[in-house]
Image: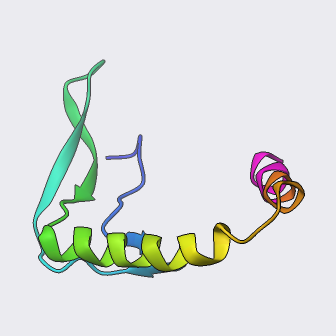
Amino acid sequence: MDCLKNSERFFINGQWVSPSAQDQKDIINPATEKPCGRIALAHSQDVNRTIEAAHVAFETWSTTTRAERLEVLRRVVS
């Protein structure tokens, strides 16, 4: 399994966190039909944590100016 890194955690609220359950799924390389990575599967608790973090982030993001938002996007792209 060397075509993808394993992604066994989620990035929520600026941190890599463990999923609420240990369910995972193999990622299959369509060219070889062999497993090339694994991902964690999200459960409702994970989705709820993500939604809560997004709501908190939106409170701050919604108060930024257009110029501030463009600067953030420029940093992301470069």
**Residue 23 falls inside the magenta stretch:** no
Q: Find residue 48 and report its horizontal and vertical position in percent.
A: 24, 74
Q: Main secondary structure of the magenta part?
A: helix
Q: In this view, does 47 lie to the left or right of 58?
A: left
- Residue 9 visible in this rendered orientation of the protein: no
Q: Find residue 6 and report its horizontal and vertical position in percent.
A: 35, 58
Q: Is residue 51 left or right of residue 43?
A: right
Q: Nearer the viewer, residue 30 or 9?
A: 9
Question: Which residue, as the protein is rendered here, is positioned at the far top?
Answer: 31
Q: Which residue is drawn at 30% across and 67% down?
A: 8
Q: Nearer the viewer, residue 75 or 23?
A: 75
Q: Which residue is drawn at 17% across and 77% down?
A: 45
Q: Which of 45 and 24 is in front in this view?
A: 45
Q: What stretch is highlighted in magenta?
A: 72-78
Indicate the colouring scheme.
rainbow
**Residue 77 falls inside the magenta stretch:** yes
